[in-house]
Amino acid sequence: MKRSMYVAVVALFLGCSVNALAGNGYMGGSGTTTAGSGSGSGSGSTDGGTTTDGPLTDQGSDQGELFGDLFVIDRYLGGETKRVPAVDPATGEPMLVMGDWIDENGNPVIDPNTNAPYQVEQQAWTTAPAIGGEPKLTEGFARYTIVNEDTGETEINPMTGDIYFPAPYPSQCVQPVADAVRWGDISSKTGLPANHLPLVITFDSTWERTECEVASTIFLANGETWDGITYYKDIYYADLVQEVEFGRLNLGRAPDAVLDHAFDEAINSINKSKSIALDASGRLLLTTDVYDEFLTNPDGTPVYLETVTKAIDSPLENLALYIKLMRDGNLITPADERGAIDRSILGGIPLWKLLELEDGPSKSLRPTIDIAHMQEFGLGDLVDASNITTYWTTRDAEGNLIVSLEACEGCEQSYGITTRSANDMSVGDDFVFSATFVASAADKTGRMTMDKVVYLNSILGINLVVGYSEYDENGDPVPGAISYTKNPVYFNFATGMNEYNRQSAFANRGNKVTEPGGGNPATYDGNVTVLVEDPATAGTWVQTDMPIFANVFGDGTTGQDFTGTDISGFTAMSDDDLQTIGYIHTYQIPGLR
């Protein structure tokens, strides 16, 4: 027999599966807007549905690739229960059971002789808790035809008497959504919930996999009026797909060496500061004494020039701080990671070329944050690692770094941690700082969205969506290793994150009331000093204290309150910080930024 594909309908009921390859939540394709593949287990498939071979015209999908176009899709907020395709625990293959034949619309297909649904072999389901941010995957089943390759005739389904057979596996594709702000509620056109765009699902029975794409049909015809606007060209559903704009957050694609160097720059600045507070957006505000590089006093001390107070506002440095805090729950560089940064990895100057340069890699240790310094200013949450101790470092004859818990001659003494600990993770106020760090790395004129947060975390490796959990010495996955492409693991913001309350958060930001010190953080009055145009004198701007909550999130008199947890709370928190940064840069006196 030669099996062919049948393209099936659009209205799909939704579910989710950590098992599905489309769980990464991205789309791609050659000349199409693909919504990601479903799972399958046919002879031509590997890794639970991704094929290494297929028809010559096979466009496949971009599963396993995270650097294509990334789009806005429907996601869980966290705390919901999702349906998950059941798998055989011994083989990891999908489990099929006899059950009601459910068509692509989620409705049972009725046997007219019994007035009951046909019984067919299809995917078995189980349930699991949903993690905030992971995609809601479609559950619709496609249909297909079987063609006799000798006669060219289409086989007849003996159950129904028609030419269509039900796919054994659900589509399990990501679900793109239309922008409600731009297009309003499109459900009157689609009949679908949550502004879902209609999908066409195609099941390839030969390779036992499903592909989805946004329907190539017209949403608005030329001359049609929608939401008070008349359009003079055809608008297709594919035109409503929203691409996520990363802007400066594309820095996350930089090599590790670049991000490590930026992190070290931030740590050096923190360690040199004489006081640390927060600005209105929550950024680290460093007060530092500046001295002349060459001139000294008669006693040999450098000549004092000025005292500067400045927030860490470098996008790259803030992104590096975000990565570190999200991964480890602290900003301490472990001793076993304090060797010179290798810039030859993933591009840059090859290591053999570096060795020819007189100005080669530094032999000095990478900096580690001054723990006592942070604790002095009430910022102990950023250095609350386990196993903090005094240790000593030296190098062997080959220049390799040696770490010891015993004092030794010629060794350099440090205070911190010797290696990462699995017990260290982001909790409590760590998320408050993480939200500020990621906002400080983004475009000031942009917005933080759930999709942007999830995709960024996937690019940075905070979400585990590509690769394997364990490799052998040859770089191959060991037996029993988890394929993150097949079983993506999303960062769970619900674990350890406090509820975010916008009003209380910004009531405790702004101008300092008391200075930090003695283990206590600074306190703030909820206001920020900005320039406000004098209504009595046009063109005259007056330095004025304005409430952050009312002016950034309201009409200047009252603010719009918000409370949230999980990824929705984190997204709102980071976006609020970003909007505050934009307000500061628009209205604050430059010297106070």
Image (cartoon, rainbow, N blue to C red):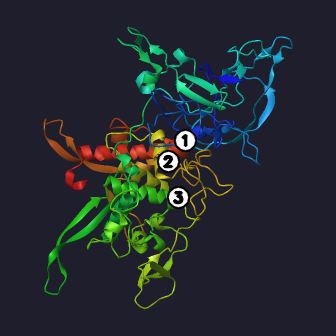
Counting from the top left corner in percent of width and height, residue 481 is at: 65, 55
Proximity of marks 1 and 3: CB atoms separated by less than 8 Å? no
Q: Identify the amino acid type marked 3.
A: Ser
Name the residue that disc number 3 marks. 426
Q: Nearer the viewer, mark 1 or mark 3?
A: 1
Q: Nearer the viewer, mark 2 or mark 3?
A: 2
Image position of 543 (left or right of 15)? left
Task: Quote the CA–CA distance across marks 2 and 3.
Answer: 17 Å
Residue 356 lies, with reference to residue 343, above or below; the image says: below
Callout 2: SS: helix
Proximity of marks 2 and 1: CB atoms separated by less than 8 Å? yes
Task: Place residue 115 in its image quadrant.
Answer: top right
Callout 3: SS: loop
Residue 458 is tagged as: 2
Q: Residues within 10 Å of mark 2 (few under 14, many from 20)?
A: many
Image position of 110 (left or right of 176)? right
Among all residues in the image, which is located at the extreme right? 114
Among all residues in the image, which is located at the extreme bottom? 409
The structure residue drawn at horizontal position 45% and vertical position 60%, both measured from the top left corner, is 324
The structure residue drawn at horizontal position 55% and vertical position 41%, both measured from the top left corner, is 24
Callout 1: SS: helix
Image position of 196 (left or right of 312)? right
Counting from the top left corner in percent of width and height, residue 188 is at: 53, 15
Residue 24 is tagged as: 1
Image position of 543 (left or right of 18)? left
Residue 375 lies, with reference to residue 227, above or below; the image says: below
Task: Quote the CA–CA distance across marks 1 and 3.
Answer: 23 Å
Nearest to N terminus: mark 2 or mark 3: 3
